[in-house]
Image (cartoon, rainbow, N blue to C red):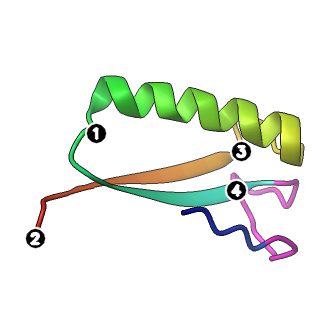
Amino acid sequence: MILLNGGQPISFAGSEEPAAYGELVSIGGLGPSVNGKLSSALAELLQNKLSVDGSRFYIKFYDVEVS
C-alpha cells in the first residue's frame, strides 16, 4: 500500500526544496542488501515521477514478525 500526501510543508537538510519521507513495513525479507535496492528504486521513482532529487528523501525500514 502506498499513500501519497502532497502539498505538505517539509524541510529537509535546511531547505524547503521538494523532498519526501516514507516508511516501509515488511513482514520479513528486509535487510541491508534488499533495503539498498529498494532505496535505489524509490530514488529513481521519486525523481522521475515527482521531481524529488534522490538525495532529498528519507525512508525508514521496518521488518516486523508475523503475528
Q: CA distance from mark 4 to mark 3?
A: 7 Å
**What is the quadrant of residue 64 in the picture?**
bottom left
Of mark 1 and mark 3, the one earlier in the sequence is: 1
Q: Position of residue 21 (x, y in %)?
A: 62, 59
Which callout, 2 or 4, points at the residue further toward the start of the chain? 4
Q: Secondary structure at mark 1?
A: loop
Marker disc for residue 20: 4
In the rendering, which numbered label is found on residue 30?
1
Question: Could you say which disc has been placed on residue 56 in the image?
Answer: 3
* N-terminal label among 2 and 1: 1
Secondary structure, magenta segment, majority class: loop
Image marks 4 and 3: residues in contact by CB distance under 8 Å: yes
How many numbered discs?
A: 4
Place of residue 20 in the rendered image (x, y in percent of width and height, measured from the top left): 70, 56
Identify the image quadrant of the C terminus. bottom left
N-term mark: 1 or 4: 4
Q: Which residue is mark 2?
A: 67
Q: Amino acid at mark 4?
A: Ala
Q: Quadrant of residue 29?
A: top left
How far is disc 1 from disc 3 in space, using C-alphas?
Answer: 22 Å
Q: Residue at x 49, y 33 (%)?
A: 38
In this picture, is 24 found above or below 31?
below
Residue range of the region highlighted in magenta in the rendering: 6-18
The residue type indicated by label 3 comes to: Arg
Q: Percent from the top left, x then y, of residue 1?
A: 54, 63
C-alpha span from label 1 to label 4: 21 Å
Disc 1 vs disc 4: Cβ atoms closer than 8 Å? no
Question: Mark 2 falls on what kind of element?
Answer: loop
